[in-house]
Image (cartoon, rainbow, N blue to C red):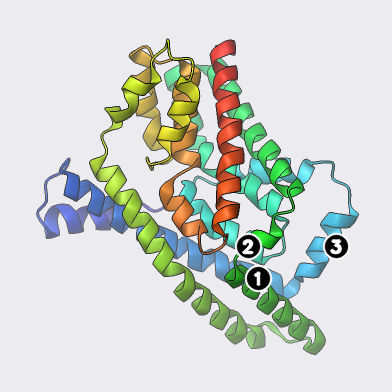
């Protein structure tokens, strides 16, 4: 889907700047160019699409539907399953998260998507089967979906809407005002477009600096932190290996497909599979660049609570994996 961006980044770094493949600076710069362009494009498309959707499906109607109809947790499961079919890393999932929040989707449901989306996708599932077999893959996929579902339900029950940033609350208020105007005046699509476009540009300008800073941090980590740096902390005999692996994974930054070969190496060196998978979930589901992007949408307290709940669920999953496999 984004191969043309990768090709452009490769050409610029390896031919335009004549840097060597495998060089730390080259890898970091290549990663920065690719992820920045990709995420800004995603952000533009999602904000524009959600702007169009929101102009026809008002926020209050969405919220009323979800509050009136008892779905018994299915909304969280559906959000998690939607995350499975969106092949994004943690930072790439943030634009969709912003779109969901702007569309009035409950915060816990959007968290379910944000958690599952980077953890599981069809490419990662294919690699997982080839590396670890069908049984392990099924357990991994089910645990990833449950992780997103349960974490979303927990976060929703904490009533965290008050911890969204003032910028997010302003965006929601503006979206509601636009929708009221569209409904009152029954404007055709052509007249709605300029208002939607203004909001798209305004949101992009506000979020872009956070995107660039977040990806810059991720690029440095990707280019300069060696994959084997944390191996000594995940030894089989260490009772606290799972929580240590999960916490130490946060500075890393990769998608599920990119980190799987590293997980295979860890397992081949005797690291328990549950510990290695907890490390993988920490790398793809929790990252400093993701926190940087979310800083525009959430207060630090909400980011801390989000990371804490997900970290706890990953640690429990890691121990369960070690018991089952």
Tag 2 secondary structure: loop
Picture coordinates of residue 90, whole percent (x, y): 48, 47
Between 265 and 165, which is closer to the camera in this rendering? Answer: 165
Q: Which of marks 3 and 1 is in front?
A: 1
**Where is mark 1, residue-wise?**
169
Q: Residues within 10 Å of mark 2 (few under 14, many from 20)?
A: many
Picture coordinates of residue 33, whole percent (x, y): 29, 58
Residue in the picture at 52% in, 52% down: 93
Whichever of callouts 2 and 1 sits on the residue coming sooner in the sequence is: 2
**Where is mark 3, residue-wise?**
64
Tag 1 secondary structure: helix
Residue in the picture at 43% in, 59% down: 39
Where, quadrant-wise, is the C terminus in this rendering?
top right
Q: How crowded is mark 1: few (under 14 residues within 10 Å), some or many (20 or more)?
A: some
**Where is mark 2, residue-wise?**
164
Whichever of callouts 3 and 1 sits on the residue coming sooner in the sequence is: 3
Between 106 and 142, which is closer to the camera in this rendering? Answer: 106
Residue in the picture at 37% in, 11% down: 270
Q: Residues within 10 Å of mark 3 (few under 14, many from 20)?
A: few
Figure check: 61 above or below 304: below
Whichever of callouts 2 and 3 sits on the residue coming sooner in the sequence is: 3
Quarter location, residue 269 = top left
2 and 1 marks in contact (CB < 8 Å): yes
Quarter location, residue 186 = bottom right
Is 104 placed left or right of 217 in the picture?
right
Figure check: 234 above or below 51: above
């Amino acid at each position: 889907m984004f191969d043309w961006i990768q090709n452009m980044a490769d050409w610029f770094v390896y031919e335009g700047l004549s840097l060597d493949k495998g060089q730390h600076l080259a890898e970091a710069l290549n990663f920065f160019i690719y992820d920045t362009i990709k995420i800004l494009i995603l952000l533009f498309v999602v904000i524009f699409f959600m702007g169009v959707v929101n102009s026809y499906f008002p926020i209050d109607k969405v919220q009323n539907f979800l509050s009136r109809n008892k779905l018994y947790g299915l909304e969280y499961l559906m959000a998690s399953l939607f995350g499975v079919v969106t092949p994004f890393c943690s930072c790439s999932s943030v634009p969709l998260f912003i779109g969901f929040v702007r569309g009035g989707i409950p915060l816990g449901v959007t968290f379910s998507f944000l958690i599952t989306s980077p953890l599981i996708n069809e490419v990662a599932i294919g690699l997982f089967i080839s590396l670890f077999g069908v049984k392990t893959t099924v357990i991994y996929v089910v645990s990833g979906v449950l992780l997103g579902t349960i974490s979303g339900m927990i976060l929703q029950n904490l009533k965290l809407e008050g911890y969204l940033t003032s910028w997010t609350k302003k965006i929601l208020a503006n979206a509601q005002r636009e929708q009221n105007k569209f409904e009152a005046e029954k404007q055709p699509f052509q007249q709605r477009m300029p208002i939607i476009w203004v909001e798209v540009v305004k949101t992009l300008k506000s979020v872009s600096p956070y995107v660039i800073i977040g990806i810059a941090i991720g690029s440095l980590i990707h280019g300069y932190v060696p994959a084997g740096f944390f191996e000594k902390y995940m030894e089989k005999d260490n009772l606290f290996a799972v929580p240590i692996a999960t916490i130490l994974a946060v500075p890393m930054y990769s998608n599920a497909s990119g980190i799987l070969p590293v997980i295979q190496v860890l397992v081949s060196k005797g690291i328990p599979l549950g510990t290695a998978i907890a490390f993988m979930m920490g790398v793809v589901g929790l990252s400093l660049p993701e926190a940087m992007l979310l800083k525009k949408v959430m207060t630090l307290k909400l980011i801390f609570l989000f990371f804490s709940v997900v970290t706890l669920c990953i640690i429990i999953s890691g121990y369960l994996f070690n018991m089952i496999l």
